[in-house]
Amino acid sequence: MTAKIAIVMGSKSDWETMAPASELLTEFNVAWRAEVVSAHRTPERLFNFARNAKAEGISLIIAGAGGAAHLPGMIASMTPLPVLGVPVQSKALSGLDSLLSIVQMPKGVAVGTLAIGAAGAFNAALLAIQMLAINDPALAEKLDAWRAQQTQTVLDNAHIGQHP
Ligand SMILES: Nc1c(C(=O)O)ncn1[C@@H]1O[C@H](COP(=O)(O)O)[C@@H](O)[C@H]1O
């Protein structure tokens, strides 16, 4: 099965952050593939990946990077596919550097930026599923069920305490 979603990251050390995206996609049976692509360390690999992603059947790219996180923006500059950027938490600046370098794109090249860390990666996958569901009724039905279940879980645990 050809991957619909590509999850790319600047370093193997980002996988712990990005893995929740792959887990949610698997839960929804959306085909994905994950790989390390670094704008800084492997610029030619970045170029090849971004230039070929659409022809390879990818619909959407989730790109995570930390620190001087130029990866999502550089991919977005070379492909018409939507790119969702995940700021990976950095040691020196706790991910604020990653967030700002992903979110502050120049007008005309878009990256949809998620929250810092694993929750951002998870939500990137959720957004990707929501986008694919627009033209996939079976996926939309699964998504509705997933959301209803999430709401029910919160309601079941809504009572925190009382006195008397
Ligand atoms: N931000 C980027 C890019 C890039 O944007 O091209 N390539 C690697 N990195 C980031 O460097 C951090 C440290 O990487 P190492 O753990 O390999 O030293 C990672 O969070 C990675 O995303």
Image (cartoon, rainbow, N blue to C red):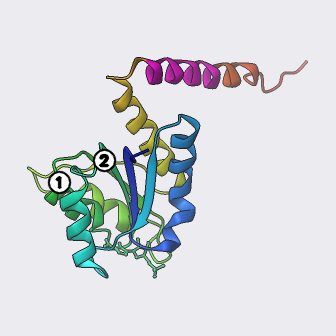
Q: Residue 147: percent from the left, percent from the top? A: 55, 23
Q: How far, Cα to Cα, is label 2 from label 1? A: 11 Å
2 or 1: mark nearer the eye: 2
Give the vertical position of 29 relative to 79 (above or below). above
**Residue found at x 45% / y 59%:** 34
Q: Is residue 57 magenta?
A: no
Q: Residue at x 72, y 22 (%)?
A: 158
Viewed as shown, does residue 159 lie left or right of 101? right
> Mark 1 near ligand 1 (CB under 8 Å)?
no
Q: Residue at x 38, y 38 (%)?
A: 128
Sequence order check: which comes first, mark 2 or mark 1?
2
* Residue 19 image offset from top left, x and y in percent: 55, 56
Q: Amino acid at mark 2?
A: Ile
Using the image, determine if residue 116 lies above or below residue 130. below
Would you name the residue on which mark 1 appears? Answer: 79
Q: Relative to the observer, which residue lies in front, 83 or 118?
A: 83
Against 133, residue 106 (above or below) is below
Instruction: Give the residue furthest to the right.
Output: 164
Left or right of 48, for residue 18: right
Q: Secondary structure at mark 2?
A: loop
Residue range highlighted in magenta = 138-151
Which residue was labeled with disc 2? 58
Label 1: which secondary element: loop
